[in-house]
């Protein structure tokens, strides 16, 4: 027959099992909180760094677009350019051709000013001529496809989109332009002549800006592989975008409501969902061009960037802390006793250490007796030597022939004060006692008797403890006693 375990053993096992389960649950909860705190700080730090990068890229874009607008205004008020826009068709051999040459020279001067400029077009509605920095088109429809061509647009469509409408500081969507057999991707800034009265619509200024320049500005933002970058105008039309090559997000992003959450002056990042996925959205208003610079980063990519040590270190540290705490508690149980929480006065300390011990085991009594004798020797030593201004813990340890660290620990664990605090309290109580018995004692002499080499130090310590300087305390004693 198998002997059934006793009820006591069952209860012990049940208690041990409950204790183990509770410890595991507490450990898991602590680990979750620590991991969450570590990840939260890491993500917040990464978002802050990334926001700074977005702000820097936005500042560069804002500066570039402001410079383009400034250059366009300079060209539009230029006399040679205005002369070309307002003049009619030029007859063969006419001296009016000089106006075209002068205007073209102005364009050739401006084009190299900034590396973002790919080309500049000036259109005259009166003459139906199109002027380029390096060329002139007197028959746009005939020369359109042979010398320059915009992607997916014939000459009529190109006229309808770029030449006929009235534009005031208009930024237009990125497109591809083929000129002299070379295809380039550009952004377009358009302005209608004249500058003071755009509704007259006498001509157009078009500045073609290199997309590669914008790419170089935003390149540092692609530290996360699925980052999406947009420039959108105030009507929420996407002018420029860079998204992962393996997926198309344009429709999803524009229909997700991200533009509705953008405020004109707000630059704080916010969380936005697109196709059910969380994105960190960073927005930088480009006020000079009335556009917005938008960057979307998937939270999943930020989490993937968390180093492995952030997941491994918290549990390891927690395990080490638990082990250290376990052995420290075991050490305290074996070596220390529970002591009163408040610091005792000198009379209470002596009474506590020298009073007889009752209801304790013989071994405990022996340890406490030995401690009481040591404490008694310490207190007697301080009482005999407190007037010595050079008295310190090192000197006392040397006189007792024990290590200074042990003496410091003994003071803390048995008397609940540091040596310096105990000595200062003892000296100040002695000084107070002397004043109460003899108010005629000079303060300098009193300080020297109580072990203070500097009377100013004595005055400050006395006032800190009793709220009165020695002289003020003498006056109070005198007032209470009525004696000189």
Image (cartoon, rainbow, N blue to C red):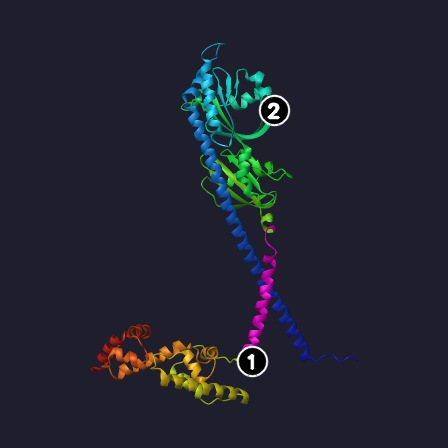
Q: Earlier in the sequence, mark 2 or mark 1?
A: 2
Question: Do we see residue 164 in this rendering?
Answer: no
Residue at 53% in and 86% down: 364
Identify the element where label 1 is drawn.
helix
Q: CA distance from mark 2 to mark 1?
A: 90 Å
Choose between 311 and 257: the one closer to the eye: 311
Magenta range is 304-333
Type of secondary structure dominating the magenta stretch: helix
Choose between 51 and 355: the one closer to the eye: 51
Q: Which residue is mark 2?
A: 181
Residue 328 sits inside the magenta stretch: yes
Q: Position of residue 25 (x, y in %)?
A: 61, 65
Q: Quadrant of the C terminus?
A: bottom left
Choose between 212 and 155: the one closer to the eye: 212
Q: Position of residue 375 (x, y in %)?
A: 44, 84
Q: Which residue is mark 1?
A: 334
Q: Is residue 108 above or below residue 263?
A: above
Give neighbour class at mark 2: few <14, some 14-19, many 20+ (Cα, 10 Å).
few
Q: Nearer the viewer, mark 2 or mark 1?
A: 2
Choose between 212 and 278: the one closer to the eye: 212
Residue 12: image quadrant is bottom right
Q: Position of residue 238 (x, y in %)?
A: 54, 34
Residue 430: image quadrant is bottom left
Contact between marks 2 and 1 (CB within 8 A): the answer is no
Residue 192 sits inside the magenta stretch: no
Q: Quadrant of the N terminus?
A: bottom right
């Amino acid at each position: 027959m198998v002997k059934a375990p006793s009820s006591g053993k069952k209860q012990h096992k049940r208690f041990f099992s409950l204790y183990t389960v509770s410890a595991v649950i507490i450990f898991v909860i602590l680990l979750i909180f620590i991991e969450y705190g570590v990840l939260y700080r890491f993500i917040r730090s990464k978002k802050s760094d990334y926001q700074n990068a977005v702000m820097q890229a936005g500042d560069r874009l804002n500066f570039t677009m402001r410079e383009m607008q400034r250059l366009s205004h300079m060209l539009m008020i230029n006399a040679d350019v205005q002369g070309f826009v307002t003049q009619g068709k030029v007859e063969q051999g006419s001296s009016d051709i000089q106006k075209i040459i002068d205007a073209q020279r102005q364009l050739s001067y401006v084009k190299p000013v900034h590396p973002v400029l790919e080309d500049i077009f000036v259109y005259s509605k009166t003459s139906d001529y199109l002027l380029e920095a390096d060329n002139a088109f007197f028959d746009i429809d005939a020369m359109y496809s042979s010398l320059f061509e915009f992607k997916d647009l014939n000459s009529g469509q190109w006229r309808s989109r770029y030449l006929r409408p009235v534009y005031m500081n208009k930024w237009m969507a990125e497109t591809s332009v083929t000129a002299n057999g070379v295809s380039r991707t550009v952004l377009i800034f358009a302005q209608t002549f004249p500058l003071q009265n755009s509704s007259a619509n006498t001509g157009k200024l078009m500045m073609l800006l290199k997309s590669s320049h914008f790419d170089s500005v935003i390149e540092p933002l692609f530290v996360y592989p699925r980052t999406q970058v947009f420039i959108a105008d105030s009507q929420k039309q996407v002018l420029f975008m860079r998204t992962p090559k393996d997926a198309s997000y344009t429709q999803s992003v524009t229909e997700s409501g991200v533009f509705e959450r953008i405020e004109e002056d707000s630059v704080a990042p916010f969380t936005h969902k697109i196709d059910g996925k969380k994105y960190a959205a960073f927005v930088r208003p480009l006020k000079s061009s009335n556009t917005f610079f938008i960057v979307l980063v998937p939270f999943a990519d930020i989490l993937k960037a968390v180093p492995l040590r952030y997941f491994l270190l918290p549990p390891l540290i927690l395990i080490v802390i638990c082990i250290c705490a376990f052995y420290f508690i075991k050490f305290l149980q074996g070596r220390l006793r529970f002591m009163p929480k408040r610091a005792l006065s000198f009379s209470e300390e002596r009474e506590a250490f020298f009073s007889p011990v009752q209801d304790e085991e013989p071994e405990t009594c022996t340890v406490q007796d030995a401690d009481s004798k040591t404490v008694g020797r310490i207190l007697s030593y301080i009482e005999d030597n407190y007037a010595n201004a050079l008295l310190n813990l090192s000197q006392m340890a040397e006189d007792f022939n024990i290590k200074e660290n042990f003496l410091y620990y003994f003071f803390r664990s048995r008397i609940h004060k540091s040596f310096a605090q105990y000595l200062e309290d003892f000296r100040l109580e002695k000084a107070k006692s002397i004043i109460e018995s003899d108010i005629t004692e000079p303060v300098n002499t009193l300080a020297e008797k109580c072990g203070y080499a500097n009377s100013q130090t004595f005055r400050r310590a006395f006032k800190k403890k009793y709220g009165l300087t020695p002289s003020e305390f003498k006056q109070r004693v005198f007032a209470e006693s009525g004696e000189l």
